[in-house]
Image (cartoon, grey):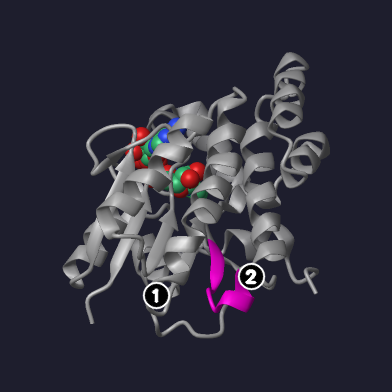
Amino acid sequence: MSRTSLVTGAASGIGRATAALLRERGHTVIGADLADADIHADLSTPEGRAELVDRARELTGGRLDAVVSCAGVAHFDPLTVKVNHFGAVATLDGLLPLLTAGTDPRAVVVGSVDSVHPTDPAIVDAALAGDEEAAVAASRAAVERGEGHLLYSSSKAAISRWVRRAAPSGAWAGAGVPLNAVAPGVVVTPLTRPLLDDPEMRGLVERSVPMPLHGHARPEQIAPLIAWLASPENALVTGQVVFVDGGADAVLRGDQVW
Ligand code: NAI
């Protein structure tokens, strides 16, 4: 049966590959992004987040079968937390009423293996408390102390923990909507290209995200897992952060996660 899916970050990288795979499989896909998409919305702002939901409602008649929240950035700037955590939460919560009107509804957010790296608890706690102003202030403070690299890992840890909390709740599990995250390792996209093209930064990336199985990924290798989690075949997987990282999490965290 044809499904209607909405993908944010659909103009590039993992979002584009996911949108293409879902279209190949016969879905109607509504792409959202800053430009080159069906819905143009800036998910770093309250206005953009509202625009996403309003336009999605107009375009679908108020019914969606799957939502994939993929839009993200990796800057030493509070924007990273605004888009990667608050933009994703607004996408998922904002579109939940459309999902509950859909058929076999599913939601997936793209986290990152970086979520297992050191984070700034002040950013993560503020994000989980839903306090965007405090999260932005904590992000600014981290940048000022020369710890801008913590913003990305903190944003991805926060959204992963949000998924763990939200998925089993009445709003999601109670409404019959599986909600999961995928956590890619290093994927070659416009987000990582500048790092991978710089020999010194590439070495740093390889040491911090070791990928013994197949090395750095292509977006097309991440999309099938997202598509499965977003499909009716996934009846029971919820609240999970599924690492799709060539073994990076297994190397970094070993067997001490239980
Ligand atoms: P990308 O840069 O190719 O695509 C990201 C898309 O998000 C772009 O089209 C961009 O315009 C959109 N976007 C950025 N800010 C936005 C905003 N304020 N409002 C709406 N859309 C916005 O990057 P890539 O690599 O495909 O990343 C997709 C997701 O995967 C991100 O959440 C990223 O953090 C995550 N990820 C990427 C990894 C990688 O190695 N490339 C590894 C792990 C996670």
- Residue at (41, 85) in percent of width and height: 233
The residue indicated by pointer 1 is: 228
- Where does the N terminus fall, quadrant-wise? bottom left
Residue 147 locus on image (x, y percent): 73, 24
231 sits left or right of 203 in the view: left
Q: Nearer the viewer, residue 111 or 27?
A: 27
- Residue at (54, 74) in percent of width and height: 178
| Vertical side of 37 occupied by 232: above or below | below
35 sits left or right of 128 in the view: left
Disc 2 element: loop
The answer to whether mark 1 is within 8 Å of ligand 1 is no
The first of marks 1 and 2 along the sequence is 1
- Circle number at residue 208: none
- Where does the C terminus fall, quadrant-wise? bottom right
Residue 25 locus on image (x, y percent): 20, 72
The part of the image, by quadrant, that contains residue 61 is bottom left
Q: Residue furthest top?
A: 144
Give the magenta-colored segment's residue range: 172-181
- Residue at (69, 26) in percent of width and height: 136
Q: CA distance from mark 1 to mark 2?
A: 15 Å
15 sits left or right of 90 in the view: left
- For badge 2, the amino acid type reads Gly
Q: Nearer the viewer, residue 233 or 186?
A: 233
The part of the image, by quadrant, that contains residue 62 is bottom left
- For badge 1, the amino acid type reads Trp
The residue indicated by pointer 2 is: 239
Residue 180 is one of the magenta-drawn residues: yes
